[in-house]
Image: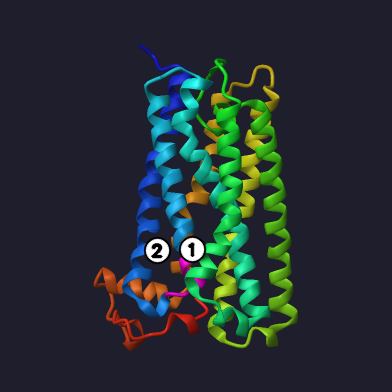
């Protein structure tokens, strides 16, 4: 029996998700483990990156569950789907806002270095997480409130959420992404024009690494939102499966890219990674003892 286009499309989605889950979890785990093993690499922004990595891994796990639903051609109503989907909604919203928190953290560290160093790490992280938690909780709860018995083709955010919630979620994501883009441009200008404000070479590397992360996120997430927009329009003759086959990969890139950008742009993290896998001998600055003071580190 020949394979239909729908069957082929489902397999493409499944293997895309499976591959990115392996690649993404490997990277996100190593962000956490390197931060745990090497105290010199611990700091406020590093802890925020760890939290983002946790949310990214949870998002990847949620896409894996959705891939299984697609592979076995499981049908849902929105009321059946959403309780399964709700944790994914929370995580996907939190990671979007955290991508706004990360450049804000760097700007705070550059513009107000003394205040930044003197704030307790735990207190700072709690305050910075208030926005992501409120935003994520709002859309997750709204999704529960608007559940109905309409049948849906896929149990994922664009279709699992009520269309009213999806529309507002998409618009808010575009707004957040636009603010991230504005901060992206501002940081580039700061690096180019006010190099004296970024005195330490290590601080410059952190800013440049963040710019790469932000650039990939901005491009990928804008394209993702374009896919959501097309789903909402429900173009005649254009199956949602085709849309997902073309656009889900950009969400997976967002969830998987952080570690690989960090390893590419950070000599310290690269050396720590090599040390973990016995690829290279660490220098004294990568000791795993707890003698360093992360409060004084930029990242």
Image spot of residue 81 (x, y percent): 47, 25
Q: Is residue 183 left or right of residue 98?
A: right
Q: Which residue is mark 2?
A: 31
| Rendering coords of residue 27 (x, y %) | 39, 58
Q: How many marks?
A: 2
Magenta region: 42-47
Q: Which SS class for mark 1?
A: helix
The answer to whether residue 171 is above or below residue 188 is above
Query: Tag 1 or tag 2, which sits nearer the N-term?
Result: 2
Q: Residues within 10 Å of mark 1 (few under 14, many from 20)?
A: many
* Visible residue check, residue 49: yes
Q: CA distance from mark 2 to mark 1?
A: 8 Å
Residue 229 rendering spot, x and y as whole percentages: 68, 33
Looking at the picture, does residue 114 appear above or below residue 52?
Answer: below
The reply to whether discs 2 and 1 touch (Cβ–Cβ < 8 Å) is yes
Q: 10 Å neighbourhood of mark 2: few (<14), some, or many (≥20)?
A: many
- The residue shown at (68%, 28%) is 164
**Which residue is under mark 1?**
49
Classify 118 as above or below 29.
below
- Residue 254 percent coordinates (x, y): 53, 50
């Amino acid at each position: 029996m020949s394979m239909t286009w729908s069957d082929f499309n489902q397999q493409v989605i499944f293997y895309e998700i499976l591959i990115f889950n392996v690649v993404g979890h490997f990277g996100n785990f190593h962000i956490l483990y390197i931060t745990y093993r090497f105290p010199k690499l611990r700091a406020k922004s590093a802890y925020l990156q760890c939290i983002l990595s946790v949310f990214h891994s949870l998002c990847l796990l949620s896409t894996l569950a959705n891939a299984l639903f697609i592979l076995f051609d499981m049908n849902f109503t929105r009321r059946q789907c959403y309780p399964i989907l709700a944790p994914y909604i929370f995580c996907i919203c939190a990671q979007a806002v955290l991508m706004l928190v990360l450049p804000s953290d760097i700007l705070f560290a550059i513009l107000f270095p003394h205040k930044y160093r003197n704030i307790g790490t735990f207190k700072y992280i709690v305050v910075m997480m208030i926005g992501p938690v409120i935003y994520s909780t709002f859309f997750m709860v709204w999704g529960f409130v608007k559940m109905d018995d309409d049948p849906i083709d896929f149990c994922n955010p664009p279709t699992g959420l009520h269309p009213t919630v999806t529309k507002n979620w998409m618009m808010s994501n575009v707004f957040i992404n636009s603010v991230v883009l504005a901060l992206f441009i501002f940081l580039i200008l700061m690096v180019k024009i006010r190099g004296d404000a970024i005195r330490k070479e290590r601080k410059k590397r952190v800013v440049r690494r963040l710019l790469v992360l932000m650039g990939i996120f901005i491009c990928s997430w804008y394209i993702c939102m374009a896919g959501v927009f097309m789903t909402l329009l429900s173009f005649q003759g254009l199956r949602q499966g085709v849309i997902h086959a073309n656009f889900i990969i950009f969400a997976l890139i967002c969830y998987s890219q952080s570690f690989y950008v960090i390893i590419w742009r950070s000599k310290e993290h690269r050396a720590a990674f090599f040390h973990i896998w016995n690829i290279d001998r660490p220098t004294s600055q990568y000791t795993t003892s707890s003698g360093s003071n992360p409060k004084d580190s930029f990242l």
